[in-house]
Amino acid sequence: MSALLQVRGLSHHYGQRIGCQDVSFDLHPGELLCIVGESGSGKSTLLKTAAAQLAPSSGSVRYHQRDGDWLDLEELSEANRRRLAREEWGFVTQNPRDGLRLNVSAGANVAERLMAMGMRNYGQLRDIAKGWLERVEIDPARIDDAPTAFSGGMQQRLQIARTLVTQPRLVFMDEPTAGLDVSVQARILDLLRRLVNELGLAAVMVTHDLAVARLLAARTMVMQGGRVVETGLTDQILDDPQHPYTQLLVSSVLTT
Amino acid sequence: MTSNYNFAFLDENTKRMLRRALLKAVAIPGYQVPFGSREMPLPYGWGTGGIQLTAALLGPDDVLKVIDQGADDTTNAVNIRRFFARVAGVTTTERTTEASVIQTRHRIPETPLREDQILVFQVPEPEPLRTLEPREAETRTLHALADYGLMHVKLYEDIAQYGHIATSYDYPVLVDGRFLTSPSPIPKFDNPKLDHSPALMLFGAGREKRLYAIPPYTKVESLAFDDHPFEIQRWEHQCELCGSDESYLDEVVVDDRGSRMFVCSDTDYCGQRRGEQAA
């Protein structure tokens, strides 16, 4: 099976400082890849660079389109980049307030990407929005409520609905469960696992929580200081860490 | 005419700059052209954009009409008309049919316009996406990419909250199938008059330093949803002065006990009709 996303030698520098350095990986359709590491290890920078939100300092990202052609993201025009980001990709931010439009209702948030794609039937938009609210376990009766009236966990679920409504093939997630309490976190992870399986999504997820990686991801990459120090099957990495930093990371997980 | 001013107040270089910008605006219907807006002897929000456009357009033979919310006799209209009578010495009129240039605030005259007339709009906010997207760089990118899904988010919100598209003025239009444009705060009642209008329509926003145009016979489409089509306002009343049942009506409170009457907002149209009825 050929890859969906091919990242080769990707670096992003903030001036003299390293964001991420020389990262390569392949992402296959239907696969969920976790990037773990401590704060400041370059996880989010890598995610944003791979998602073409930041321009790479060097290296390349290629995306395998539905029609079978490979797309080099650096050569992509702004119009096509936006179309891709809207129709085939999704991006879930850590803080749902960054990913949502807070001054319009939940329904409008879910339907926005569809309207941007040209859907012009109010009744249809509303039905789809209701369906998606239900799928992310938000009461469809709250479709006209403002996102600010929602709890943090509901906002995050709303953001997931808003992102997945166009049935993207690839979703980037930047610590989607950080900052939520443990029970809400568990529900969202459960939801994500179900949706990823149902829709056959490929996803790259950044997290600092090894439990999340173990629950969701088949493969995990460990980052430190902007570089990937270890990569492999999640179970293998967590049960038999090779790199000293990974060993430290695994041993520092609290067991109850 | 006061001889201490250059003809029509602005100096010739400024008028030339404005005309160049206007030509560009006409060449790209609905596109907002930046221009070097000047200080005018009236405050921003009172029509500085419109007044600069009018100054650039006027010639000695032009006949100027100025309306404010359809009326010829309100402060804004009277002052701008007097201003141009003083600094340009042009003939002014209240008759729509006699005017060659009509500067307007928030209405299009009821009397159909002709090919030899120019309508100049005073625009407070030229960017229709501004309330949804505050970043100028971003709205420009959205225009460049014709990425207008955002506007429908606003219309969606209207229907979700009020059951119908409640936007009643400054109703967004798509000009020539390309640029999303603010028609200035005219009531949506006037939107159909923009479509394939024989008269040239020019829009000036002085504070925002933008002007744009809808050339004659250009397709102007009011945005809507398939199942919630565009509709204009309707009244159960007729004008109490001239009896018109097809013009845009103002509701006027006439005493302290809350009595009210409905009259045409277009004073010239109403006056002409009453004149014909008396004759």
Image (cartoon, rainbow, N blue to C red):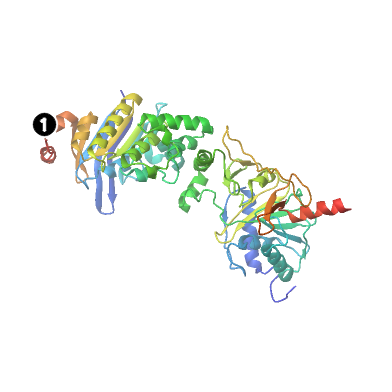
- As rendered, which of B126 and B163 lies closer to the eye? B163
Q: Measuring 58% from the left and 64% from the top, which residue is drawn there? A: B44
Which residue extends farthest right? B279
Which residue matches tag 1?
A: A240
Which residue extends farthest top? A1
Where, by quadrant of the figure, is residue B207 drawn? bottom right
Horizontal and vertical percent position of residue A106: 42, 39
Reply above or below: B220 against A217.
below
Which residue extends farthest bottom? B4
Q: Is residue B52 left or right of residue B61?
A: left
Where, by quadrant of the figure, is residue A107 drawn? top left
Q: Secondary structure at mark 1?
A: loop
Where, by quadrant of the figure, is residue A216 drawn? top left
Reply above or below: B144 against A168.
below
Reply above or below: B75 against B167.
below
Residue B96 appears in the picture as rendered: no
| Chain ID, mark 1 | A
